[in-house]
Image (spheres, rainbow, N blue to C red):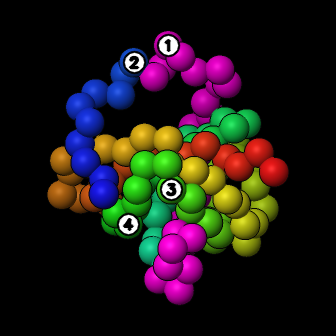
Amino acid sequence: MASGKGSVLWTYSRRRFKRVGTLARVSLCTAENPRNRFEGRILNCSRKGFYLETDADLEKGGFVSLTVEQVYSETMKLPRKRELLGRVAWCRTLNDPFAFMYGYGIDLDEE
C-alpha cells in the first residue's frame, strides 16, 4: 500500500541518469489484477525509469504494466500505445487535492 515516506530529495543525488520533464497520459494495471485499469500521468522520464502520478494504490517492489495513451511533450520519445513494464521503486502520498493521490518512482524492466 502506498504511504507517505516524507521527502524524496535524497534520491536526486543518487540518480544515475538525467531526468527529462515530460507529460504523458497513461493507463496502467498491476500483475495481480490486470483487468482493473487506472489512469495516470508521467511527469518526467529517464533511460531507466520515470515518475508517475495515479490514484492506483501500488505496492513498492510490485510490477506495473502501462500503456502510453497520449504524449503531450516532444521531449518524451515514446510512441502512443507503447506498452511498458516497470517495478515500483518508491512511493509517496500527494497532499494536493487537485492532483492524483499517489506519486511513484518506476524502474523500467530490463528485459
Query: Relative to residue 89, is residue 78 depicted above or below?
Result: below
**Are the two marked residues, 2 and 1, in contact with CB atoms closer than 8 angstroms?**
yes
- What range is drawn magenta here? 11-36
Question: Can you give x and y, in whole percent of width and height, for residue 51 in the image?
Answer: 50, 44
CA gap, disc 1 and disc 3: 24 Å
Q: Is residue 4 visible?
A: yes
Q: Tag 3 or tag 1, which sits nearer the N-term?
A: 1
Q: Which residue is mark 1?
A: 13
Quadrant of residue 102 in the image? bottom left
CA gap, disc 4 and disc 2: 24 Å
Q: Nearer the viewer, mark 1 or mark 3?
A: 3
CA gap, disc 3 and disc 2: 22 Å
Query: Relative to residue 90, is residue 42 depicted above or below?
Result: below
Q: Which residue is mark 3?
A: 62
Quadrant of residue 49 in the image? top right
For badge 1, the amino acid type reads Ser
Q: Residue at x 56, y 62 (%)?
A: 64
Residue 56 marker: 4
Decide whether residue 33 is among the magenta residues. Answer: yes
Given residues 62 and 17, the one toward you in this image is 62
For badge 2, the amino acid type reads Trp
Q: Residue at x 39, y 18 (%)?
A: 10
For badge 3, the amino acid type reads Gly
Q: Tag 4 or tag 1, which sits nearer the N-term?
A: 1
CA gap, disc 2 and disc 1: 6 Å
- Binning the other alpha carbons within 10 Å of mark 2 as few (below 14), some (14 to 19) or many (20 upward) gives few
